[in-house]
Image: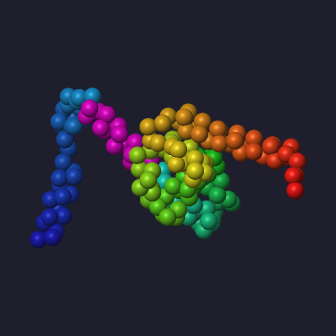
Amino acid sequence: MENENQNEIVESQNTEIAPEQRYYNGPVTLEEAESYITSGLVSTARNYVAIGYWLRRIRDGKLYEEEGHQNFEQYVHEKYGKDKGWASKCIKVNQQLSKDGDSPLLDSRYRDYSTYQLVELAYMTEEQREQATPEQTIKQLQEIRKSNLRIVQIHSVNRQFTPNLL
């Protein structure tokens, strides 16, 4: 009985659908198209966090040596055609924004953010992240990071020039 069900599943997966019957070839509304895009963006963001997790496992465990790579950077370049910066961003997003900071799952607090927003959030302090919302543009998120950096710099300069009153 189980084999019959598996055969039916395989047959249904192998059935060729005529091009005019495919869901993406039919009429579509703006709302439907936007829904597909939103779904894809959510999946992309979640996958970015998972990629960071697995890259970190490969890097930290030196698993790249199993294929004879000299270092992690060489592995990433040869295996995925990406540079060290890409891998670093993926890993940083994973470390900062994954569930418990050490899993392939995106923390639920960040589920409404895009991949690019997640990268910005990963380089923020926790206090800065509290000011961020998914509705903000990348430029607005960058301003949060920069404005708080300027405040820290101003405080640092003020401490240098404030005489010790004690």
Q: What residue is shown at x 60% (from left), y 36% (from top)? A: 143
- 53 relative position to 150: left or right: left
Residue 165 drawn at (x, y percent): 87, 52
Quadrant of the image occupied by residue 28: top left
At 85% from the left and 45% from the top, the residue drawn is 162
Q: Indicate the colouring scheme.
A: rainbow
Q: Quick check: 100 above or below 80?
A: below
Quarter occupied by residue 66: bottom right
Furthest toward the front, the residue is: 166
Magenta span of residues = 31-47
Query: Does residue 30 appear anywhere in the picture?
Result: yes
Quadrant position of the C terminus in the picture: bottom right
As for residue 69 lying within the magenta part, the answer is: no
- Residue 82: where, in percent of width, then height? 58, 46
Q: Is residue 110 left or right of residue 25?
A: right
- Is residue 35 located in the magenta-colored stretch of the structure? yes
Residue located farthest toward the left when viewing the structure as drawn: 1
21 in relation to 13, above or below:
above
Quadrant of the snapshot with the N terminus: bottom left
Query: In the rendered view, would you say 58 is above or below 82?
Result: below
Residue found at x 64% / y 49%? 84
Q: What's the magenta bit mostly, secondary-structure-wise?
A: helix
Q: Is residue 82 left or right of residue 2?
A: right
Front in this rendered view, residue 32 or 157: 157
- Give coordinates of residue 150: x percent, y percent: 70, 39
Residue 120, quarter of the rendered image = top right
Residue 79 shows up from this direction: no
Q: Position of residue 100 (x, y in %)?
A: 49, 64
Between 59 and 107, the one nearer to me in the picture: 107
